[in-house]
Amino acid sequence: MSPLPLVSVVCLCYNHARFLREALDSVLVQTYPNIEVIVVDDCSTDGSASIIREYIAKHPHIKFISTGQNRGNTTAFNMGWRASHGAYIIDFATDDALLPERVAQQVAAFEKLDQTYGVVYTDAVYINDASTPTAYHYKRRQNGELDDFAPSGDVFADLLRQYFICPPTMMVRRQVFDHLGGYDETLAYEDFDFWVRSSRIYNYFYLDKVTTKRRVHTHSLSGGWYKPGNKLLASTVMVCRKAAALVKTGKEREALAQRLKYEARHAYLTRNFEEAEQLLDLLGQQAGIPVLYKFLGVLNRNRINLGLLRKVYHYLKH
């Protein structure tokens, strides 16, 4: 009987002291027996390091890496990934938590797939600061069946068009990171870029299980996504340019156009005028600019602030 493949859980910590014990405990109680635990602290200032030392004293098999100075998620993960040895990798933020069967379920799914599949992703339950469940990532019918968009196979065009994967649910085959050279450290966040570059080469598989608790709180990275001057949106522009160089078919080009329209609208309505202009220029190169977006371009160039419309929309929606 062949040995079980090693799974590396790269635990990324930056000022997660409030949640760190719950996160690390969730890794240590996994039912899967062959796990490598690597904790990367990105120079936390809230006492996280002392909690990590406490866990290392109790569990000497935990590997610890300090980034030396605050480097950001992409660099911190790459440091952990390069120090790892697992056949499969989990990028795990330590404000989230894993359900006990998570690793076992995803490895079992991977072992049934061929080498063209590089990512297995799942459903997640959202939790608040108090770890109280608030919702699931995907919509479901009353009988529990999935009632949402969660495709498998070649998902490149799907990932260009819309957001549908809950990032912390992903388990990734090691060769994907080897192929890509890890995350792009010039970016402020990793998800969209990883999806674009990896799905161009590898298939994805959706496993219909809830495997992860994803925490949504006031200090989440995504909380300030469209604030004026936010570096996340500048990274989105960079990824869209990469995607434009990778599209091959009309379907993919149309999907990218949909993404560019969405990002340009939100960039404009949040007064990120420079990024909005860049996104509209890229849209023109890909598919031509529809009349509505030509008008948006005029408003954008004249810095006419209609951000109130976005606030009213979100108020009515929520």
Image: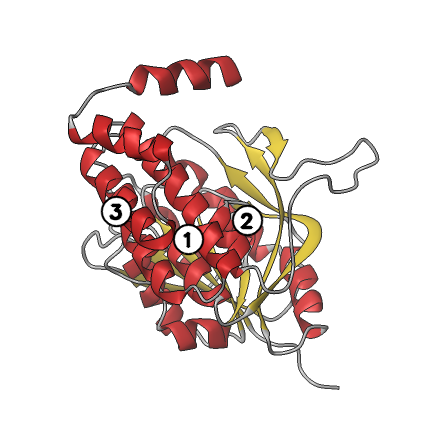
Q: Relative to residue 232, is residue 238 depicted above or below? A: below
**Residue in the foreground of this view, choosing between 156 and 114:** 156
Label 3 secondary element: helix
Q: Residue furthest bottom?
A: 1
**Residue in the foreground of this view, choosing between 104 and 318:** 318
Question: What amino acid is found at the position of numbered circle 1 in the picture?
Answer: Asp
Q: Position of residue 54 (x, y in %)?
A: 40, 52
The residue identified by callout 1 is 191
**Residue in the foreground of this view, choosing between 143 and 54:** 143
The residue identified by callout 2 is 165
Q: Is residue 310 visible?
A: yes
Pointers 1 and 2 in contact (C-beta within 8 Å): yes
Label 2 secondary element: loop
Pointers 1 and 3 in contact (C-beta within 8 Å): no
Return the mark for residue 231: none
Examine the image and state in which quarter residue 111 appears.
Answer: bottom right
Along the polypeptide, which appears first: circle 1 or circle 2?
A: 2
Along the polypeptide, which appears first: circle 3 or circle 2?
A: 2
Kindly report the distance in space between the C-alpha atoms of the residues bearing marks 3 and 2.
27 Å
